[in-house]
């Protein structure tokens, strides 16, 4: 049974490790190729796009894929939509692995917003020294905010446009609570901007912000495509695949 995992997340790597250990399964992981030195999962790996839903559907047919797992980032809206269209076109069973989002706790000063544009609009009223953790592709949404100072953290170097006053910090999680506390203090951060990725690896920044009483602008995640079944964790996704095998 051939399983294609649309990956790039820590859950996708763990899922590939679990499934590749089953001799009844052939596992291929597809990576977008945006990270220069990605952490490779177990099994076969392909890198690059498919050319939209039609290209993905053609790949599913050409490689006799029996099950499709969308384990991309919760904000990878385009590839999730393409996966849903390609699965419907080819009749391929599809599951989206979506870790739960973060939940606010007592003491949090969260400002939920529906988009990066809305986050940029909210910032001037909340602080002038901003810790931006939306990934390198999200920095452009804040490029027009010349009156603010940004510390932008990403795995890969961002590209223009960026705000005029931007310091880039190239780091990959997981991050520690002590490290996040020290970072916020050292850079005199006044407001944090993040996407609701739900990742435990990057959650310590939320705790540190709560302890320091900082406002947090939280970009809400898009929903999974209509009609697509979801699982909250690797175990649930692996069980779904095993049920197909049985």
Image (cartoon, grey):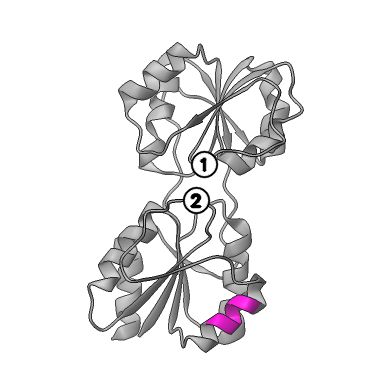
Q: Residue at x 53, y 69 (%)?
A: 228
> Which residue position is annotated with label 1?
156
Q: Compared with residue 157, is residue 62 higher up or lower down, i.e. above or below?
A: below
The quarter of the displayed image where residue 161 is located: top right
> Which residue position is annotated with label 2?
35
Q: Can you name the residue that lies furthest to the right here?
A: 144
The quadrant of the image that shows the N terminus is bottom left
The quarter of the displayed image where residue 111 is located: top right
- Magenta segment range? 55-59
Is residue 186 among the parts visible in the rendering? Answer: yes
83 sits left or right of 246 in the view = right
Measuring from the top left, give residue 212's x and y in whole percent: 43, 14
Picture mark count? 2
Q: Which residue is drawn at 43% across and 28% down?
A: 206
Check residue 6 for magenta coloring. no
Per the model, the C-alpha gap separating discs 1 and 2 is: 7 Å
Q: Which residue is drawn at 64% across and 74% down?
A: 53
């Amino acid at each position: 049974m051939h399983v294609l995992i649309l990956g790039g997340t820590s859950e996708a790597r763990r899922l590939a490790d679990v499934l590749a250990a089953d001799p009844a399964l052939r596992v291929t992981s597809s990576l977008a190729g945006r990270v220069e030195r990605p952490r490779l999962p177990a099994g076969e790996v392909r890198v690059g796009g498919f050319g939209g839903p039609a290209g993905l559907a053609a790949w599913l047919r050409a490689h006799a894929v029996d099950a499709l797992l969308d384990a991309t980032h919760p904000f990878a809206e385009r590839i999730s939509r393409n996966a849903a269209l390609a699965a419907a076109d080819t009749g391929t069973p599809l599951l989206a692995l979506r870790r739960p989002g973060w939940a606010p706790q007592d003491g949090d000063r969260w400002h939920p917003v529906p988009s990066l544009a809305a986050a940029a609009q909210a910032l001037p009223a909340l602080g002038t020294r901003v810790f931006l953790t939306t990934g390198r592709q999200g920095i452009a949404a804040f490029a027009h905010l010349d009156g603010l100072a940004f510390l932008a953290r990403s795995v890969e170097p961002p590209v223009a446009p960026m705000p005029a006053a931007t310091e880039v910090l190239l780091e990959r999680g997981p991050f520690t609570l002590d490290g996040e506390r020290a970072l916020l203090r050292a850079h005199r951060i006044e407001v944090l901007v993040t996407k609701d990725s739900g990742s435990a690896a990057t959650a310590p920044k939320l705790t540190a912000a709560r302890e320091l009483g900082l406002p947090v602008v939280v970009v809400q995640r898009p929903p999974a495509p209509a009609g697509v079944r979801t699982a909250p964790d690797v175990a649930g996704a692996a069980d779904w695949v095993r049920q197909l095998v049985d």
